[in-house]
Amino acid sequence: MTGVESERWTVGTSLAVASAWPDAGRRDRTRVTTDKAVWATDPADAERVDPDRADVEAARGGDAGAFEALVIRYQARIVSFAAAIVHDTGAAEDVAQEAFIRAWKGLRSFRGDSAFKTWLYKIASNAARTHLERHVRQARVGSESLDDEEAALRADEVPSGATGVEETLTTREAIDGALAQLPEDWRLAVVLRDIEGLDYKEIAEVTGAPIGTVESRIFRARRRLRPLLCTVR
């Protein structure tokens, strides 16, 4: 996603979440004071544990600008995460936007039991699962085969030699193809760990699985991926 496209997507998301929460932009200071999230430590420690705390608190009071700051902070990571799960860049942007809208709508119920980032990834994970389930249903109804004309057109598009950009795309396609062969739970766990950089505790919170199960899924996913990716540079 280019800088221009990223900016456009952010603005579109902001408009969408603003319409989803009519009070956006008007901070209800009484609500902020009386309905704060439960942060387990004192303010100074909580700020270090969750650097998003100030923006989260402001957004919980209806400050759309604070929420937009959170969107800008995490949009690239959430789009990348969604793309690794749904294997479609366009669909990944839709999944990410849906995740941010769900986060905006549910922010007042966020209690701070986990970091905002972890909570957001859980929402994005659920949005990606919803997309995959819908895609499977649509695939069963529609035809999965290409007609001869479309197949011929695609064959004509195969390059005789790869440029640097094409090699990069080929590598990404190889990784996506390998990830697609994993069971969904394994894929989600290994993407969160090896691509998004979450620790095991955070992944357990996102997936709702015990840490031991998370470790097992990641180990098995890596073992399955190793021979599939041995030729990828």
Image (cartoon, grey):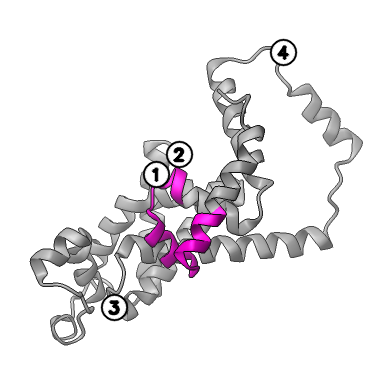
Of residues 161 and 195, the one drawn nearer to the viewer in this rendering: 195
At label 2, the amino acid type is Met
Nearer the viewer's eye, disc 2 or disc 4? 4
Instruction: Estimate the x, y position of residue 121 in percent, counting from the top left.
Output: 42, 60
Of residues 116 and 233, the one drawn nearer to the viewer in this rendering: 233
* Label 3 SS: loop
Residue drawn at x 18%, y 76% is 27
The residues bearing labels 3 and 4 have C-alpha atoms spaced at a distance of 55 Å
Residue that badge 3 annotates? 111
The residues bearing labels 3 and 1 have C-alpha atoms spaced at a distance of 30 Å
Instruction: Estimate the x, y position of residue 210 in percent, counting from the top left.
Output: 48, 68
Nearer the viewer's eye, disc 2 or disc 3? 3
Q: State whether residue 42 is above or below residue 85.
A: below
Q: Looking at the rendering, in which quadrant would you find the N terminus?
A: top left
Residue that badge 1 annotates? 6
Of residues 150 and 40, the one drawn nearer to the viewer in this rendering: 40
Which mark, residue 1? 2
The residues bearing labels 4 and 1 have C-alpha atoms spaced at a distance of 32 Å
Instruction: Using a 10 Å C-alpha cutoff, classify the residue at mark 3 as few (fewer than 14 neighbours), some (14 to 19) or many (20 or more).
Output: some
Instruction: Using a 10 Å C-alpha cutoff, classify the residue at mark 2 as few (fewer than 14 neighbours), some (14 to 19) or many (20 or more).
Output: few
Instruction: Estimate the x, y position of residue 123 in percent, counting from the top left.
Output: 45, 66
The residues bearing labels 2 and 4 have C-alpha atoms spaced at a distance of 26 Å
Q: Is residue 201 magenta?
A: yes
Of the two numbered discs 4 and 1 on the same chain, state the one appearing first in sequence. 1
In the picture, measured across the screen, residue 216 lies left or right of residue 178, that is left
* Label 1 SS: helix
Q: State whether residue 115 is above or below residue 94.
A: below
At label 3, the amino acid type is Arg
Nearer the viewer's eye, disc 3 or disc 1? 3
